[in-house]
Amino acid sequence: MAEWKPVCRLEEIPLLGSRIVNSTGGDVAVFRTASGEVFALRDQCPHGGGSIARGLVHGNQVTCPKHGWRLRLDSGEVVAPDQGCSRRYPVRVERHTVLVAI
């Protein structure tokens, strides 16, 4: 069973930005969309293994800065025509604190 880990205050993640959380299973990228939704994915592009936390957030997607692959923040799935997936982690916000199930 996953443990809910408090990772930061909501305001510490800028709109259209991200934050990297270290975990024993690998780094996790926590994203915040323009509308304020928060998502968490494994911080590794399925294509080249680069950090997606440094990518461009747009809508409910992030574009990997290394090769331009787009990943859906709500599922971790790569947008066609490319194929692949980055692990998604459940996220919740309680009293302005972001928690990730790791």
Image (cartoon, grey):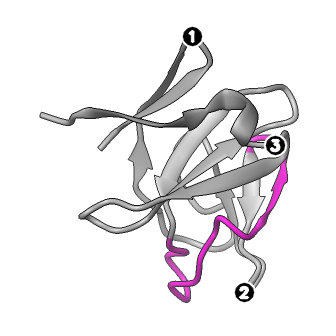
Q: Amino acid at mark 3?
A: Pro
Check disc 2: other Cα within 10 Å, few if <14, some if 14-19, many if 20+: some
Task: Give the main secondary structure of the magenta stretch.
Answer: loop
Q: Which residue is mark 1?
A: 95
Dot 3: what SS?
A: loop
Q: CA distance from mark 1 to mark 2?
A: 35 Å
Residue 14 numbered tag: 3
Numbered disc in front, either 3 or 2? 3
Task: State whether residue 87 is above or below residue 59.
Answer: below
Relative to 31, 34 lies left or right: right
Give the image quarter of residue 63. Answer: bottom right
Magenta extent: 44-60
In the image shown, does 14 or 60 lie closer to the viewer? 14
Task: State whether residue 95 is above or below residue 99.
Answer: above
Q: CA distance from mark 3 to mark 2?
A: 21 Å
Q: Earlier in the sequence, mark 3 or mark 1?
A: 3
Work out which quarter of the rendered image holds the N terminus and state it. Answer: top left
Dot 2: what SS?
A: loop
Q: Residue at x 22, y 34 (%)?
A: 3
Q: Earlier in the sequence, mark 3 or mark 2?
A: 3
Q: Which residue is mark 2?
A: 66
Residues at discs 3 and 2 in contact (Cβ within 8 Å): no
Q: Amino acid at mark 2?
A: Lys
Q: Residue at x 20, y 36 (%)?
A: 2
